[in-house]
Image (cartoon, grey):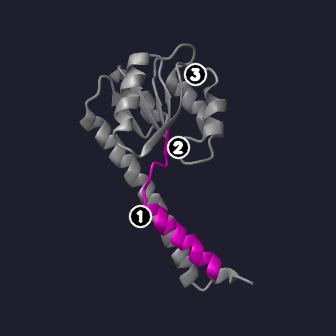
Amino acid sequence: MEVGLFGIVFYICVSFKKSVLMEQKAYKIFIIEDSDKDRELLEKSLASYNLFQVVGCLPGGSGALALIQSLHPDLLFIDVELPGLPGYEIVNKLHDVIMWDMKVVFYTAYPQYMLEAIRSAAFDFLLKPFEMKELDLIINRFVQAKIEKRRGKYRECYAWYRRGER
């Protein structure tokens, strides 16, 4: 039985719509933080959102590129002051190898690194110690950005179909 292009387009559009409407624990997070206390606090705080799965943690930048490439996280929380290589240098190296939409949040106790975070095209900056309302803002922006991106894909798919490119 031949499905045809219409059936394929319909399936793709419905799939995008379902993924927008049914947000699940689909977002993967990777954390690079050398302080066990700060990492555990962040993990515990992120668990309260029920949308995220922490797929990996490292205490420093060693091995980060390969691990991030293999795990494909959606969101990276990274400290600036890390043993060996500073966090913003790791992020700059990631820009050359990451081919998916991964957002980066610098997680640090040093506000003076905010400019470097901006230059590294960070999604956001979370200052330690943080209050939940600060993390809420970041998480809400992140989820909204993901939903908008999916809606955009759905609109593109629908517009493609409406133009008669069947």
Looking at the rendering, the stretch of residues picked out in magenta corresponds to 7-29
C-alpha gap between disc 2 and disc 1 = 21 Å
Mark pair 1, 3: CA separation: 36 Å
Q: Which amino acid type corresponds to the residue marked 1 in the rendered image? A: Leu
Seen in the image, is 128 located left or right of residue 158?
left
Whole-percent x, y for residue 163 in the image: 57, 84
Q: Position of residue 99 (x, y in %)?
A: 63, 46
Query: Does residue 161 belong to the magenta stretch?
Result: no
162 lies above or below 86: below
Q: Mark 2 points at which residue?
A: 102
The quadrant of the image that shows the C terminus is bottom right
Categorize mark 2 by other alpha carbons within 10 Å: few (<14), some (14-19), many (20+): some
Q: Which mark is residue 21?
A: 1
Q: In which quarter of the image is residue 161?
A: bottom right
Which residue is under mark 3? Answer: 61
Q: Say which residue appears at 58% left-offset and 22% top-offset.
A: 61
Which of discs 1 and 3 lies nearer the camera? The answer is 1
Secondary structure predominantly adopted by residues drawn in magenta: helix
Pick whichever of labels 1 and 3 is earlier in the sequence. Answer: 1
Residue drawn where x is 29% and y is 23% of the image: 129
Q: Report x, y in % for residue 154.
A: 50, 69
Question: Mark 2 or 1, which is nearer the eye?
Answer: 1
Asked whether the beta carbons under mark 2 and mark 1 sit within 8 Å of each other, the answer is: no
Classed neighbour count for the residue bearing mark 1: other residues with Cα under 10 Å, few (<14), some (14–19), many (≥20) = few
**Nearest the eye: 142 or 92:** 142
CA–CA distance between discs 3 and 2?
17 Å
Answer with the quarter of the image where residue 70 lies: top right
